[in-house]
Amino acid sequence: MEEETVNKEDIKYSLRTVGLKEKNVVLVHSSLSSFGYVVGGADTIIDALLETVGKEGTIVMPTFTWGSFHDQEKVVFDLANTSVKSEVGIIPEIFRKRKEAIRSHHICHSVAAIGPHRKDVMGEGVRSFGKGSTFEQLYKLDAWNLFLGVGFSSCTELHSVEEYMQVPYRYYRDFKGSFVILPDGTEVPSQSVEYLRKKGYINDFKKMEKVFSKHKALHTCRIGKAKIINVRIKDIFDITTAL
């Protein structure tokens, strides 16, 4: 069976189909392998995103290291060199290395961003999802949440609702004694806290796609083998908070 082939123009057409426009701020969760064969690989997808939002738009991608760091007593987080490929995939890994990208300081939930709002979405590097975090900033900027070949199991914005509502199955831990190495080599103490699930609990976020669809909040299409979903972060937060 011949593999599905996708090029940059295909991707740009799909992004416009789900409502992405110039000047938008958008957080992107992604899976390169979900598309089939993408001509030019991860760089093609990144270029398509940047060209769609234009010079006045901002692309944000997760550069999470939760799997590596959340249960460690002390952490050294190197902004320039700590890889994210094994946790969030090759697209964010390539994206964070672009010369125009900057990366936030949260030990477990950093993001990389390119565009005029890149500094605005960095957050304070303290809370993972709550007040002062990247995810609060994205809400304030009326950003979109774009899912490229992944579903709501990857929706970090739903953790913001958990922290806002102070759910009983999560608790805070800090990273005292941990450090962040800045791109210039300077080492600074970490201020990060993490909002962790207690043992024995899981998140079942897949079911939220039907909920958001019922509220007519989703913009969807298919490209290659991948399903594309675009939804405003305000809708994710407000609908889920009400529930």
Image (cartoon, rainbow, N blue to C red):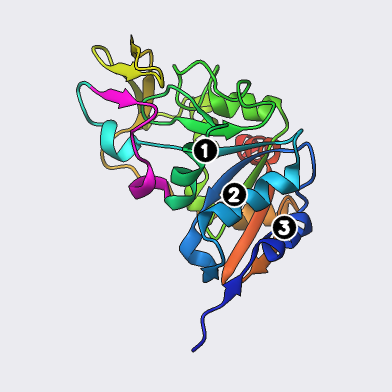
Of pointers 1 and 2, the one earlier in the residue sequence: 2
Mark nearest the camera among 3 and 1 is: 1
Mark nearest the camera among 1 and 2 is: 1
Q: Is residue 13 left or right of residue 148?
A: right
The residue that mark 1 highlights is 98
Q: Is residue 84 left or right of residue 240?
A: left
Q: Is residue 94 above or below residue 103?
A: below
**Residue found 49% across the figure and 57% down from its top:** 31
Q: Which residues are magenta?
A: 75-89
Question: Is label 3 in a helix, a strand or a loop?
Answer: helix
Q: Is residue 241 above or below residue 8?
A: above
The answer to whether marks 3 and 1 mark residues whose Cβ atoms lie closer than 8 Å is no
Question: Is label 1 in a helix, a strand or a loop?
Answer: loop
For marks 3 and 2, give the CA distance.
10 Å
Q: Within the magenta stretch, is there residue 76?
A: yes
The residue that mark 2 highlights is 46
Q: Within the magenta stretch, is there residue 134?
A: no
Question: Is label 2 in a helix, a strand or a loop?
Answer: helix
Q: Percent x, y for residue 134? A: 55, 26
Q: Is residue 88 visible?
A: yes
Q: Residues within 10 Å of mark 2 (few under 14, many from 20)?
A: some
Q: Residues within 10 Å of mark 1 (few under 14, many from 20)?
A: few
For marks 1 and 2, give the CA distance.
10 Å
Outermost left residue: 73
Looking at numbered disc 2 in the image, what kind of residue is underneath it? Ile
Q: Percent x, y for residue 188? A: 34, 10
**Residue found 38% across the figure and 42% down from its top:** 84
The residue that mark 3 highlights is 12
Quadrant of residue 12 within the rendered picture: bottom right
